[in-house]
Structure formats: structure tokens, C-alpha cells
Amino acid sequence: MRYTPYPMFKPLSSPRSQPQPGHRYDVAVVGAGLAGSELSWRLARAGQDVLLVSQALDHLGNLYQPDVAGADFPAGSLLAQVKQQIAPDTDGWVFHCRLKAEIERTAGIHLLQSCVTELNELPGEVQLSSWEGPTLRAGAVVMAVGAFLKGRLLIGETMEEAGRLSEVAYDFLADDLSAHGLYLTYASGQAHSRADAPDYEVRFQILAPGELDGFRVRRMDNVYALGRCTPGDHTYASVLTDAASLAAELLAGGLPESEA
């Protein structure tokens, strides 16, 4: 079936990212939740070559609630536009499917299913190691991993190594950040399930306040952090607003120059 874009999403003229082995992206975004999806969309629409890594493409843009009823997405954000697209439907799965379709059709985004385990800094770039495939390269890396740094999900007496139901935690990446000398502390939150399933608690690690200068990770060059993996009280609106701010910062000169 042919896909027909909705009028609010204008076709883009820049080419889609079609990387070959060894390709260097302008920005690699680790985590394709709300923050990572919004940031990648904004950067790509501004002409950047973006790698967006998700541990599970079927979970892209998932919320910590079963639907988008009452979700406060700022006007002009990708998520607000997708919410408007599916209205009056508010189902979380319908929202996810439409959001994923818009990310996939945005020129300049390479959407990759993988699990990042290490960040290695070299002059002018950051290399990302993973469980699968060759080393990935980018001028800058943004960690938008939400509640997945050593995430532990608790349902009654059961504990799962996950940041959301059936979504594996980033234990190796958390250990690698610690090996770089970064101090991680703990946070927790509640997630609401559908009426026929129990709510659950998630506990996870975040960067300590002293490890950040705005969005930039102090002890690492060209590495940034965004969303729930950073200190503070976060809402959907605040995370998406921060994604817009970080996109503007990177586009205004926060990125290393590409190779000649």
C-alpha cells in the first residue's frame, strides 16, 4: 500500500542517510524515546546526517502510559503533530506506529536497531561500540537513554533488568560511563499500565548534577545528555522543550567539523 504523507509534514529535499561501513554521522543519538526522536527529527530537518539508535524499533517513542490522552506535547513538536494526526484516537500503539513512520520518512535519519555498549573519544569524533556490527562514528553523541542506565523494573516481588516492560537495560553503557570517571546516581519513577495490568516502578541511574554543563557531559568531548538520564524533574513538555534547545545549540556551532 502506498504511503501518503499528511499535509502537516512537508517532503524534504535533502538526501536520506545511506551510510556505508565507516560512515561518519554528524550526530548519533542513543535512545529513540520521546527525547531522542524529537532531537533527531529537528536535526535532520536542519540538514544534519543523524544516526538514531534504538534497542527495539517496535518500542520507538513509547510512553510511560498506555495512551496519549492528556499528554502535554509542546506545539510545533513532532509528537504534538503526530498526536494531532491520530486524533480522536489516543491509543499508545497507534501513536507509536505513526511516530515511527514519520521518523522513517524523514530524510537524513538512519534508524538503527542496536545496543550501544561503549563510547570511545578520538580527535574530532566519538566512536560507538555495540553488541552487533562494526564500530559506529559520529561527530557528536547525545545520550537520550531515559530510564535505561541500569534500569530495574519492579512489579510486586518481581524484578526485571529493563527500563520499561520487556525493554532491556543499558548496563554495559552505564559501566562504560563509570569507567570514564563519570559519577552516576539513582532515580525512580512510576509507570501506568492498562486497566488489566499492574502499574510498575522503574529504578535507574542518571548522571550526577556535577557531571553536566548544560547538556554537555563535562568529562567527555562532544558527548551530551538529554531527558530522564539527567538530573531534575522531567515531564513530556520539559523533555521535548529541552530537545528543541539542544538541537538549536548543536546547530549553532556545537558540532565538530566533518572530515574533508
Image (tube, rainbow, N blue to C red):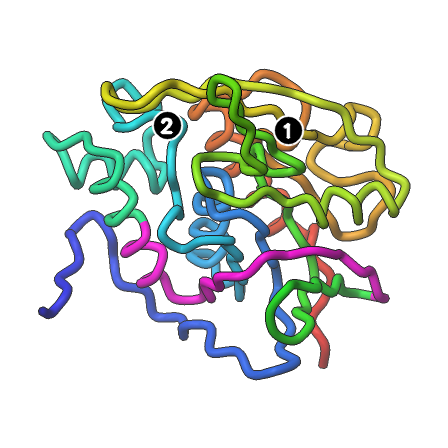
Tell me what residue is drawn at x 16 percent, y 39 percent. Answer: 86
Residue sitting at x 65%, y 73%: 24
Q: Nearer the viewer, residue 171 or 127?
A: 171
Q: Secondary structure at mark 2?
A: loop
Farthest residue in the front direction?
157
Give the left or right position of residue 157, taking residue 126 as reference: left
- The amino acid at mark 2 is Pro
Where is residue 87? Give x, y as percent: 13, 33
Residue 156 spot, x, y in % from top left: 48, 17
Identify which residue is drawn at 54% across, 61% down: 114
Tag in front: 2 or 1: 1
Quadrant hosting residue 90: top left
**Quick check: is 31 in the magenta stretch?**
no
Numbered circles on residues, count:
2
- Locate residue 119, reporting x and y percent: 76, 56
Q: Quadrant of residue 169?
A: top right
Q: Amino acid at mark 1?
A: Phe
- The span picked out in magenta is 100-123
Q: Which residue is mark 2?
A: 74
| Among numbered discs 2 and 1, the one appearing first in the sequence | 2
Front-most of residues 65 and 243: 65
Which residue is at the far right? 181
> Which residue corresponds to the image point at 27% horizontal and 56% vertical from the top-left?
101
Q: Secondary structure at mark 1?
A: strand
